[in-house]
Amino acid sequence: MLSLSGAVAIATGCAAVTPAVSPVPMPKPTETAAPAEVRLDGDKRAVVSPAAPAPSFAAWRTGFRSRAQAAGIAPATLDRAFAGISPNPRVLELDRFQPEFTRPIWQYLDSAVSDLRVKNGQAKGAALAPVLARIEADFGVEREVVLAIWGLESAYGANYGDFRVIRSLATLAWDGRRKAFAEQELIAALRIIEAGDIAPGRMLGSWAGAMGHTQFIPSSFLAYAVDFTGDGRRDIWAPGAEDALASTANYLARFGWQTGAPAAVEVRLPEGFDFRLGDGSTKRSAPAWEAAGIRAMTGAPLPDAGDVAILLPAGARGPAFAIYRNFNVIRRYNNATSYALAISHLADRIGGAGPFQAAWPRGDRMLTRAEAQELQRRLTQQGFDTQGADGIVGPNTRSAVRSWQSASGRVPDGYVSSTLLDALRKSDS
């Protein structure tokens, strides 16, 4: 997972797969709350600080040193961490990157849950079986889920980033889009160094400051990382990955992971299903959904593990899923639906399950950012308010789409593609 990078890892060739929809702020390992910005699963309503010329890096560094010392960071720690530090132009380039295209969820899942990733996850599970058994016993989080997060975040440790975290965060705190957030994380990173968990030169991660095998940002490290090996350090960078995997399990457990319950189950919908109920948030018990004719794709009853919602990530023509509390716990780790579905499915596949049975609408074309803005403007003009036209399709936009679809006699599944925009244009003409 990434902290400030959002969707750019796909474009920049990072080994860890990142969903096209930006995640929301804290609590999650890779991003803490940023006062300057609020995100709602892709419907981003950002309030950012006005652009202003940045001071010189030297001037910023002098001011930051005073603020860090006021926050309790020792001068010796600052001297060690900032020795030879200069701004990283590549970090600023990535911070300013704005993708034009949204990656279809099926393309994302093809990569996130590839046969190779499944195979490697099974191999890691076998190699680390004793460690994973202890983690499972201590935290109540199934090993397959921990492995799946490790697989998506760093390809099982093959690539957790080679950016020096202090340098990256200093660059972003000096001249990034979210300076206050970056400075907050920089001070947290200094606390980690001061505690003796890691030396500055080994504190490596993504350009945006996400660290180690499972990509914790510094503030989340301070809150949730554990010393599972008992060596006195929380080393989420160590080759064995024990601390990183245990910290990931601890994070999920702290946010209510239910042992033995699923995250997502592929289901078969009955004929005549009211697609307005497939919004991912309308909750009923498993027996209630079964009474409405919904069954697991295997034909088995739905697991009865608390409230269940129905998710249609590609609308009425794509796979349907029953999602449980654990799905939302995964979203605390990274609040993108595509990410949570990928983790759930990868964990199932590592455990021996097969691919999804229903087909994705692979012939559909997703909207460009400009087209999504046009969609939002047209919907709002017709009386279906999307609460802004930012070009990011999230819950507010999908709700407006469902209302427009219902009013125009279409299947109200909230699914957005170029076909929907064409229909909206025709209705406007």
Image (cartoon, helix red, strand yellow):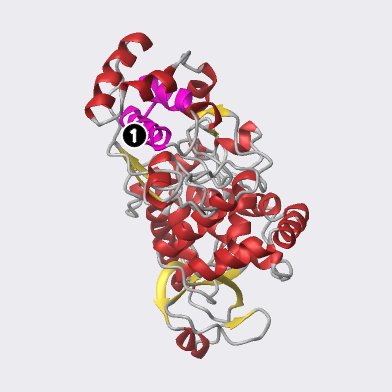
Task: Name, please, the residue furthest toward the front.
Answer: 231
Residue 411 in view of the camera: no
Left or right: 306 in relation to 162: left
Looking at the magenta stretch, what is its main secondary structure?
Answer: helix
Which region is colored magenta?
Answer: 166-195
The three-letter amino acid code for the residue at tag 1 is: Phe
User: Magenta stretch containing residue 168, yes or no?
Assistant: yes
| Residue 32 occupies quadrant | top left
Residue 427 in view of the camera: yes
Q: Which residue occupies the foreground of this view, 398 or 243?
A: 243
Percent position (x, y) of residue 101? 57, 38
Q: Which residue is mark 1?
A: 181
Percent position (x, y) of residue 279? 45, 66
In the structure shown, which secondary structural element does the residue marked by tag 1 occupy?
A: helix
User: Magenta stretch containing residue 412, yes or no?
Assistant: no
Residue drawn at the location 65% of the way across and 43% of the way down = 239
Residue drawn at the location 58% of the way across and 54% of the way down = 149
429 relative to 122, above or below: above
Count of numbered labels shown in the rendering: 1
Percent position (x, y) of residue 30? 46, 44
| Label 1 CA crowd tier, 10 Å (few <14, some 14–19, many 20+) | many
Residue drawn at the location 40% of the way across and 46% of the way down = 220
Percent position (x, y) of residue 288? 45, 87
392 relative to 84, above or below: below
